[in-house]
Image (tube, coloured by chain):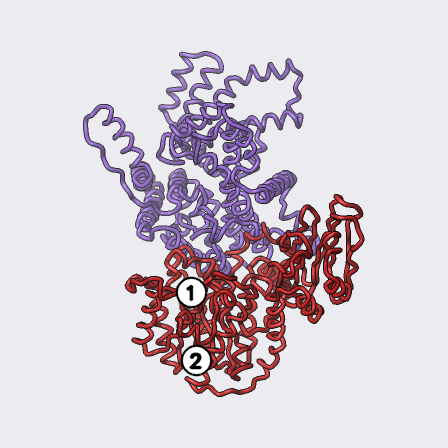
Amino acid sequence: MKQYVIKTAAFSLIFLLLFEFFTICYVPVYFEDSDWPTTGVYQAFYSLKKNTVDAVFLGSSAGNCGFIPQELYNQYGITSYNLSCEQQNLISSYYWLRECLRFQKPKAVVLECKFLFESDREKLTEPWFRKALTYMRWSSVKKEAVETVCDILPDESEISWIIPMIRFHSRWEETNEAESFTHYLSMTDKHHLMGYFPKFTSIGKGAAWNMQQNGDDVRKANPSRLELDYLDKIVALCRNRGMTLILTYTPCEMTKDKHVFLEEYAEAAGIPFIDFNDNVVMEKISYSVSTDNESKWHANVSGARKLTDYIGEYLSSGLAMEAHRDSQWEKTKNAYENVEKDYLLASEKEPETYLTLLSESRDRYIVFLSIYAGDAERMNDRVKQQLTDLGLNLPLKKQWNQRYFAVLTKDGAAENEEEKSGQKLEISGRLAGGSSYRMESGVNSVIYLNDKPYSLQRTGLSIVVYDTYRCTVIDTVSYDPKSSFLLR
Amino acid sequence: MSLFSLLFFCAFVVSIGIYYLIPKKYQWVALLIYSAGFFYLSCNPATAVYLVISVISAALAAKMIHRCKANENDKYARLALITGLVINLGILAALKYTNFLLSNLNSLSGVLKVMPAIPMTEWAAPIGISFYTMQIIAYLLDVYWGITEPQNNVAKAALFIGYWPQLTSGPIARYNDMKEQLYSGHEFSWRNVTFGLQRMLWGLFKKLVLSERLAVMVDMVYSDTAYFNGIYIWAAAVMFMFQLYTDFSGCMDIIIGASECYGIVLPENFRRPFFSRSVQEYWQRWHITLGTWLKDYVLYPLMRTRKWKKLIQKTGKKFRGKAAKQIPSYLGMLVVWLLIGLWHGGDWKYIIGMGLWFFGCIVLSKVLDPWFKKAKDALHINADNGVWHLIQSLRVLLLVAIGNVFFRLDSLEAALHALMQGLILEGHDSYYYSKLWTLGLNESNRNVLLIGLLILLTVSLLQRKGSVRELIARQNIVIRWIIYFILIFSVIILGRYGPGFDAQAFIYQGF
């Protein structure tokens, strides 16, 4: 009998290990190298010490890239965590708030309300619930959240939440198991921005909207009944726990009807509402949509800094939150400084300054460069010198039309160039962390990272900057020697 | 409750644990409770009333038959038998064939314009009614013929009739084979449990990895027989044949394997049918318990009746030679095949496709047999030759595939239309033909299917030499466990189940 028990135990153990391996391979994960690092954000939340968070941010992607906990700490000494995520509806926000309360005792909750008007029944879909709730740990809160999802989506089964392999096993078709597993191991526990996800680019000139001119009919605002119920629950929960709830609406194509609705709702509930689309607020924080928004929905680093500072002012002055030091936020200062540097780089237009910034942070970057030999020759001496200082030997005297590639790492440059004009050059390789790259010459050369084309395919010097820590591309520019500015 | 749901698997594992922990003499009670639970979770619980009526009527009838026989009162024994049969067949006929009768009456009255159409019934039938009714009939006849003693304990009789693994799709077991196994209890056997679980796993592989993929291909063609024709119709027919096999035999593997875990051996229902050389042999290897049941409880008793013997005498006078013997035999077969068709469902498509078509194939092969033999001799064909065997098997597959078209499609008209479409071989471009190799599956899924079918063929070939599980058991632990884990994770990863898939119930579960 003893041998059967040992055999069964050994068999079960191997089974569980293999099952866990395949679960890691097939259940989708979203780390810093994804568009939105939901998995990383929630993993990092659970690693915080208990009862160290003063404020939490909740909401959809607009909140995720709109509020910077590190900025709040650096400027006001307030410890906060951003629990917003891509397409987080108010149902998910409610359960994340409850989950947060199992570990933390925040005094303030900042809720980004865009989804109140965005998610009707058609948008309350399984993928978004999965993204928002999969990485919540199992507890009575998650059980209730899953039951709610199954009530809303009749095709959902609770068991597929308990054992996600039931839902995701069919991903074997699109998954390379070894790569997925390596990726998981290399990216896990890499989030150091306290839930914030930076956006670097700007929407550009001409992008502006005026809430006061849109949606004059205030009766038009039509929030989802279900979401409104959960907003009520969030309000009640905050009231019961003595937390201050602040409703916000980050800069986007806001309309007056939504503004009036939220204003009236907040007034009735006796809670503050900060509409960052309000011209008065925008002017106060010098918010410019064209430079502070990444898209019409999301703020970039500059915009997020302004929004966070406004909230910080409100929390410290309005709610009298006291500044204090916490080693966890001290440790993540450096990661945020790097984000600020990345943002500077990604918003720089002048080539010489750009190359200087690149040189300063080159230990964190891998830089992919491609250029026509002829174009290299036409660059100004300062740029040529800067490129040489980076360790590159540009083909300045080569035949016109020949293509040159370089991969610049902290250890030096790997360079390749066409032997003669017209001969197609293709180089590829793998970066630490599992990402692959490929560079192809042609009429316009293309730089692929994980099979996604990045270079702008313009003439001149093409640069793709890859952040080795977050394993993601942070900037793509081209520099035509005929022009004195970088193009994005 | 689906046999491939996690709920079932968890409940089953718990049931095994409890079964071996309680004293042997109460194990049958545990099985009865499991069966009641399974029934409750698998169909409309209200239909339990039919099952209860069947159990009580069968138990009482069997007791009466035995008592009358003991008193040498054959008249009352026969009356008790007929009463038992009428009650049980009556329930089956009312629940499964009323609509068939009504639709034919409505068609007839529509032509004759004698009365308005009668609305169809929506009576729910209990799970496995066709299977357990056949077990009851066999039980009553066995008691009547003195082959077995009746079961005096109604609860024990209920277990025989409603033993949960059989409720899904059979197999149709005999009381004599089951009574000892069901009631005497079993010591825990590592071998029984591991072998049973292996068989269940193999069944899940057939169902979730193979059958569900084949279903995609079949559904694609049969959902639009107006568009698809020619080679597509035949490809779908062959695919459905494999789908039906992997589905039904997969279900049997789960059922028999589950029962084996309790130490109860159920009769086999399949013996590598696609290796058959004739349609008759195919049916001796396919759904074996149905065939033997019809032979033992319909064909042979029919042939023993006085009226049948008179018929033989009459045909002997009218016809000479072989025909005099063959015609009554064919008539007996006709009855059996009509019943096979009717057993599959109250619809002409079953009577024609699953009954008369196969009857026709078998009779024709018997009639033409002398000519075939002459032709073989003239061509110097060695009947034991492997290639000849293959040709014969392919011929059988084609004939079976045609019969199964009637099984799969919604009506007799739809099946005939599809077969006619199969004869059209033109009218489409190369894009149309390029889809033939996937039929709704993408390339990777098609490859999984092909590899899976290859594994199935390999296992079938190995089974000719003996038990594959015994063969695996003889390997060292590393090889054994590698095989088990490959199979387990093939089912978990490659199986088509869960959200996003619509894993269908076992095809024979509705019978």
Closest to the observer: B177 or A230? A230
Chain painted red? A
The CA span between labels 2 and 1 is 19 Å
Residue farthest along the left direction in this orientation: B115
| Residue bearing mark 1 | A89
Q: Within 10 Å of the Cα at label 2, are there few (<14), some (14-19), or many (20+) other Cα atoms?
A: many
- Name the chain letter of the residue that bears numbered label 1: A
Q: Quadrant of residue B69?
A: top left
Closest to the observer: A217 or B174? A217
Residue located at (70% from left, 63% from top):
A366
| Residue bearing mark 2 | A108
Q: Amino acid at mark 2?
A: Ala
Q: Quadrant of residue A378?
A: bottom right
Per the rendering, the mark at residue A282 is none
* Quadrant location, the C terminus of chain B: top left
User: Does residue A198 sit above or below B260 in this rendering?
Assistant: below
List x then y, in percent, for residue A409: 73, 64
Under circle 2, the secondary element is strand
Does label 2 or label 1 sit earlier along the sequence?
1
